[in-house]
Amino acid sequence: MAGRANNIVNHLITTSRLLYQKISLTTHSKGAIFPEAPGEGICCGSGCQNCVWLVYAEEILRVIETHPDFLDKSNKKEIYRNIESQLKNEIQDPNLREFVLMDIRSKFSI
């Protein structure tokens, strides 16, 4: 029981640390954890093969694959939920958001 509680606490600490890093580091050119989200109006909304949001999602996945805090892949669903939450804040169009999340799910093997 104590081991499970420690795992939960460690995941919460990691998640809060990563959220803090994203907030504090995306404005700096060095050490950014997640890439800068595409600006408003950049996407045409037609579901292009090279949609700026798909490129953004792939960059997030690349960061997750290489960042030391994500080396333990046992919490894939939690990591995916964090990505999903972040994209819900950044992609206002629900159809486009689901399109991007579907691409992430297929590559994330959830």
Image: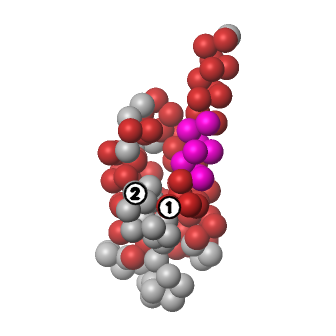
Between discs 2 and 1, the one toward the N terminus: 1
| Quarter where residue 104 is shown | bottom left
Return the x and y of residue 25 as percentages of the image width and height: 50, 61
Return the x and y of residue 44 as percentages of the image width and height: 45, 88
Q: Residue at position x 57%, y 72% from top?
A: 91
Q: Are marks 2 and 1 in contact (CB under 8 Å)?
A: yes
Q: Describe residue 58's horizontal placement relative to residue 23 as left or right.
A: left
Q: Describe residue 2's horizontal placement relative to residue 38 as left or right.
A: right
Residue 93 seen in the current view: yes
Q: Where 8 sits versus 67, above or below?
A: above
Q: Residue at position x 62%, y 75% from top?
A: 92
**Disc assigned to residue 31:** 2
Q: Amino acid at mark 1?
A: Leu
Q: Amino acid at mark 2?
A: Gly
Say how many tags the image has.
2
Return the x and y of residue 31 as percentages of the image width and height: 40, 57
Q: Which residues are magenta?
A: 13-20
**Disc assigned to residue 25:** 1
Asked which secondary structure carries label 2, the reply is loop
